[in-house]
Amino acid sequence: MGSPMLVLTSSSPESTRNFGRATAAVCRPGDVVALIGDVGAGKTTYAQGLGEGLGVESQVTSSTFVLVRQYSGDELDLYHIDLYRLDSLEEVQSLDLDEHLYGEGVTVLEWADKFPSILPDEYLRVNIDYSGQERRTISVEGIGQRGRAMAEELKASLDRSQ
């Protein structure tokens, strides 16, 4: 793993959600966002912001019990996949995720670090670390050419907004 291109501190769920919204602005069809973090770190909150940024009108909810959810956005659909309850690569492969990971929407994959072999060659890696109380450290790394471009666009966008 390389070093993160962007490291942010989130002091509230709204701040985490806003970062998800900002990420949506740099997404294109077929982009994958790999979310990593402990239980309660804010992965679903981030995914909610991503959905809001894509124009998803329904509430993005935790996919823990429904492993794959699809939401319709203004221009791009959001595929929300949660690998938390899966124990083996065979279980993951039985979901046939290729249409999501290589589709026309944006895929956000929670617990992506459990099965790194399913990740495409290019994606945005977002690691959310719970640092106590409401503080979270969000580290972003672009993997592959498209992932790096997403990270650079996101960094530039956040720099402009400050």
Image (cartoon, rainbow, N blue to C red):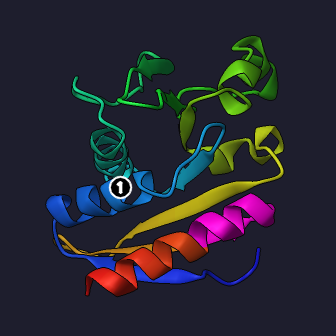
Q: Along the line of sight, which residue is nearer the eye, 155 or 97? A: 155
Residue at image position (16%, 67%) is 12
Q: Quadrant of the C terminus?
A: bottom left
Q: Where 32 sits versus 147, above or below?
A: above
Magenta segment, principal secondary structure? helix
- At a point 77% along the width and 74% down the height, the residue shown is 1
Residue at 16% across / 59% down in the picture? Answer: 14
Magenta residues span 141-151
**Residue at (62, 45) in percent of width and height:** 32
Residue type, numbered disc 1: Gly
Residue closest to the eye, 153 or 82? 153
Vertical position of residue 131 compared to residue 49: above or below:
below
Residue 70 on image: x %, y %:
45, 19
Give how far across and how far down residue 130 sits, in percent.
Answer: 34, 68
Tag 1 residue = 20
Q: Is residue 18 left or right of residue 24?
A: left
Q: Is residue 131 above or below residue 107?
A: below
Residue 145 lies, with reference to residue 56, above or below; the image says below
Residue 9 on the magenta span: no
Q: Quadrant of residue 73?
A: top left
Measured as percent of width and height from the top left, residue 108 is found at: 52, 40
